[in-house]
Amino acid sequence: MANEKMIYTGAEVHLSNEEQRWPLHTALAWVMTRDKRFTNQAGIDDFSPYVPWDEFEELRESRQAWRLLFNDMKSGHVPVFGIRWGKNAAEEIEIPPKELEGLDWGEHNGTSALRIRAATQDEDEHLSLDTNLKFVNVQVSSNAMVMCYLQQDQPIAFSTTQIGIAERPDGPDYMALSAAAYWIATEGGTFRFFARDEAVWKSAYKALLTQIVGGNVKVVGRIEGVGFPKAVEGSDFSGIAVNYPYTETRDDSIFGDLPYLEPGQLVTTADWQRDNDSLRFTGVRIPVATHLQVSRPDIARLWPFGAVLEKTTEPQRVRSSQGKYLAVVKRLEEIYPKGVPSPPEAPRKAMIRHLLETTPALGGKLDEQTLQKAIDYYNERLSK
C-alpha cells in the first residue's frame, strides 16, 4: 500500500493508513533507530535527555535524537498534543509551537510530559523530570514522524554495524567472555541490533552465565588482576549483576557491596590488556578476577549457529570472503597494534606477501580489495 504509515496504537508500532499519535518516548526511539522492534520495546524510563544549551555540545544518542525531534516540534513540522498542567485542565489541545520555547523533556506518572527549563544548565540537569510541568500526556503525530524521519534513513544509534564482526569461537583455546556474549547476542554474526538495546545483551549474558554456573563453559582469568590465567569457579558468577556493554552503568555497581561483572567494550586485541572483562565487588579496588576468558570449544558446542567451526589446532583454509576478511583483521591487530600505516610506509603488495606467508588460513590467496577493507575497518575501530 503506497500510503502506509508507521503508527503507535498504544502497544505496538505497525503499518497503517490511519493518523495516530505516539508518546514522546516512542517518537524518540524511532528518531534514534528507525527500527520497529526497538521502538516497540522502548519505555519512558529508557531515556532522560535534555535540550543542549550549547549547540556544539557533544551529545550521546538520546540527546542527539531529542534535539532533532524537539526542533521539529518547535518548527511545527511535527504537531504536538497534550494537556496543560493545572488543577482545572483536563482537555487535550494541539500545543502551539511558540509555547514550546523554554520547555524540555519531562515525565509525569509514567507518561511523557514537557517541563519548564531552569535558569542555568547545571541547575536544569539536577531537576527532577516531573518538576515545573507545563504539559502532560504529551504525544506527537505519527504521520508527521514518519514523513520527517524515514525508515530507510541512517539511524543515530550505534549498532552492531559499527561494533564490527562477531569473533568466531574457532579452535581449541579461549576467547574473551564479552566476545562470546557478542557471538551469542548476534546469533553468530547474523542478527543486527542497537548497542543500547539492553534486552538483547541481557538475554545473551543470561544464557552464557547460566552455562558457566552449570559447569558447561570453562572460565579462566587473572586472579585479582595479576599473574597467569587460572581457572575461575563457575559458582562465582551465580546471581551477579552485569554492567551490559554500551548501556548505562547500573546503580548496584556504584552503591552497596554486591558482586558484578564488568564486560570490556569489545575492543581490539591490542587494547585487551587495558579494557577487558572483570569480576568485581562494588567499592573494592582490587578485582576478583580480570581478563576473563571462556573456552572456545564450549561456546562452539553450545552456540554453533550453523557455522562450520574449527575444532583442531591444524590451520584451516578460510573459504568464505567474510572469514578471510576476519582472518586478515586478526593478523593486522597483531602486526600493527597502533594501526596500519599509509601505503608509503607499509606498501600493500609487500603486506599481502607477508600475510600470505604467515597466515596459512588464507590459503595462499588475498586480493588488495579485501586487504584494504580489513585495513579500513581496523583503523576505524582504533580511532574510536
Image: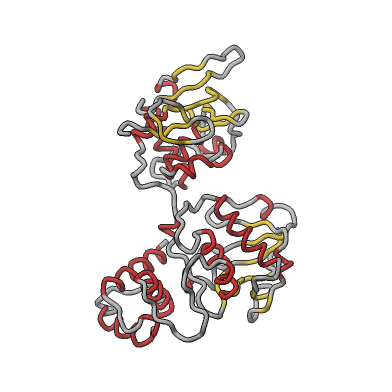
Residue 333 lies, with reference to residue 20, above or below; the image says below
Say whether residue 232 is left or right of residue 68. Answer: right
Residue 282 % position (x, y): 70, 58
Residue 1 % position (x, y): 32, 34
What's the colour scheme?
secondary structure
Residue at the location (36% across, 25% down)? 76
Residue 22 % position (x, y): 47, 30
| Quadrant into which the C terminus falls | bottom left
Q: Nearer the viewer, residue 40 or 369?
A: 40
Say whether residue 2 is left or right of residue 210. Answer: left
Q: Nearer the viewer, residue 364 or 164?
A: 364
Q: Is residue 118 at least partly visible in the picture?
A: no
Residue at the location (61% across, 56% down)? 243
Q: Is residue 198 at least partly visible in the picture?
A: yes
Say whether residue 183 is left or right of residue 357. Answer: right
Mark count:
0
Residue at the location (44% across, 21% down)? 99
Residue 357 lies, with reference to residue 20, above or below; the image says below
Residue 64 lies, with reference to residue 5, above or below; the image says below
Q: Nearer the viewer, residue 360 or 104?
A: 360
Residue 329 % position (x, y): 39, 73
